[in-house]
Amino acid sequence: MLDQIRTEFFKLRKRWLPYVLLVALLISVLLPLVVNYINYKSILSKNPELASIEVTVNPDGSTTISGLPPFEPDSRFDTTYMYAQQLARLKKSLVLPGAMESVFDSIPNLGMFLVIVLAASVIGNEYGWGTVRQAIGRGNSRASYLASKVLTTTITAVAGIIAVVAVGLIATIITSLLVEGSIAWEGFASYFFISLGASLLVIMVYIALATFFAVLLRSAMAGMAVAMVWFIGESIVMALLIMSTGWLADLNVYLLSYNTGQLLSFTFGSDFTADMWKSVGLLVLYSGIFLAGSYGIFRRQDLTA
Amino acid sequence: MQKDIVIRTHGLTKRFKTARRNILAVDNLSIEVPKGSIYGFLGPNGSGKTTTIGMLLGLIRPSSGSIELFGQDLSSEGSALLKRASSVLENSPTYPYLSGRDNLEVYSRMRGVVDRQKINEVLDIVGLTKRADSLSKTYSLGMRQRLTIALALLSDPDLVILDEPSNGLDPSGIIDTRNLIRQLGAQGKTIFLSSHLLHEVEQVCDYVAVLNHGKVIAQGPVDALLHRGKMLEFKVDDIDKALSLLKECAWISTVETDNKHLYVVTDEERHPDVNEILVHSGIKVFEMKKASDSLEDFFLDVVEGEQQGGPNA
């Protein structure tokens, strides 16, 4: 099994795909920070009187803005007040702990699609190339073959996300120091690790989902497409369920998107609620079902074709 | 003394069930591949060859019957047994984004040992040393086929299963493959060769099995099936008289005619006796020579014979 995992890493590190996905994720995290910082500096240079604005993220997650110029209702367009509001929003997105929220928003949102691409191609391409036949025909057990692929994808995705979060953290520390000059660390560590854990769990579910469809459909492209259709389809179903009445309305709490959404709604200062724990349980259950289903199909699959 | 058997199937059957059809791909197949033999597995397209190889390699489960590799049951000891085997599969599956060398390294790593000297050695054997570091997606079909042959040689297997190994190869590649198969056979490895190229099979194989509609319709040593060294071809003036005369001889196993020639199968030491009987009976013998069926004739004969109502071999 260890040999197979090493082999999978050997194959993966020779591909462009993981590097492209990592760069895409890094860009999705760093680009908003850079753009926000440029905007912040631009507004400030045009409105130097707004430098005194202070934005504080309270331990309960709420934001307090102080130092705003008085609002002038008589004025048709109080541009200074508008700029002040915009500056306050930008400051929140650039200074820790608020800055980290946008990092954690980007990772699962784009990351979900990226891990679907990664997981589906790691298993699905082997069908297209016919290499799955070579591997199994050489005495590799189907269980360890599939497990090594899932583990390799998971380790790669987790390592990639941790690397991106680390880069995001360093970048937000830098922007915090540039904007604020200091960082308020109080309550940050617990928020950071819970958010990281939630992101990883959400990513894990989508790895399992993509693996399941890639195995079922014996194709990377079909696996990606159906996993994404599932993702999009669920949002539509969820919207319809919310509009309905009775027991139907309650069904959405069992959907994948609802539960990933629950976990990703965790923000600085908020509590990890019982509902969130329920979502953790359901997402673990979903992952288990998808992985068991993948193995159940792969174990009996005709690999001669 | 009975030979060691490397592959033994007993009543091997594979049935594909779909909503509309029930296809019997392999029907009660029983074959024995002796250790150290080069075993040809012949059959027209759709006869069940690839499905059988798939079952031998654990790629597909049999509907019924059993497979033994190296004397042990494949269903219980599959992974360990298959590690002693290697295969060259149809369509030359390789990783397109890896070089030939890296493709070999992938399968070395799966076994937990990366032996670079061995990788260079097998690349040299198949003549890919110069292109070893090019991506396999830039290879021609023939080169990819050579690469999969190199993969098969990498683990120094006891059993090599080859599914159409000459597909896509140019004439010199076909000759190289034939020589390689002979070389492997000379090293005592057991070769299971599925091929459409009857001429190739005839030149390298010791044993053959002919498959049609999932059933073995003939199998045995090639020499015996083709009556090599045993068949005589006569040109005589009275074929009917000669035919009825020779049919009475118990030591002659087969007497047949195509209305122009007479074919007699018997042990080599009795060949002069056949001629003597004919001459003593007043039959004029214009020509007498040793003859044998080509595998192609034999193949067409048994396949057509089976299609006309039952095996004739």
Image (cartoon, coloured by chain):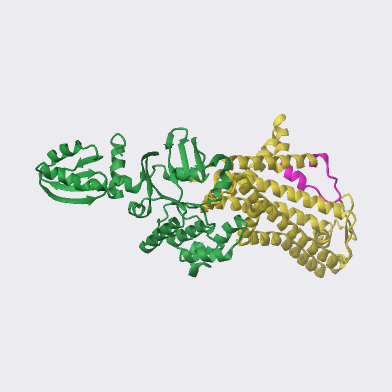
Q: In this view, does A2 lie above or below A260?
A: below
Left or right of A87? Residue A147 is left
- Chain coloured green here: B
Left or right of B224? Residue A155 is right
Is residue B261 visible to us here?
A: no
Q: Where is residue B169 in the image (x, y as percent from the top left)?
A: 39, 60
Range of the magenta residues? A258-276
Left or right of A126? Residue A177 is right
Q: Where is residue A70 in the image (x, y as percent from the top left)?
A: 89, 59
Left or right of A81? Residue A161 is left
**Residue at position x 28%, y 36% from top?**
B308
Q: Quadrant of the C terminus of chain B?
A: top left
Residue A264 sits inside the magenta stretch: yes
Is residue B290 visible to us here?
A: yes
> B209 or A297, which is in the foreground?
B209
Q: Position of residue A118 (x, y in %)?
A: 63, 54
> A167 or B179, which is in the foreground?
B179
Q: Residue A82 falls in which quadrant of the image?
A: bottom right
**Residue at position x 80%, y 69% from top?**
A46
> B280 or A77, which is in the foreground?
B280
Residue A132 sits inside the magenta stretch: no
The total of numbered circles placed on residues is 0
Identify the hue of chain A. yellow
Q: Residue A189 falls in which quadrant of the image?
A: bottom right
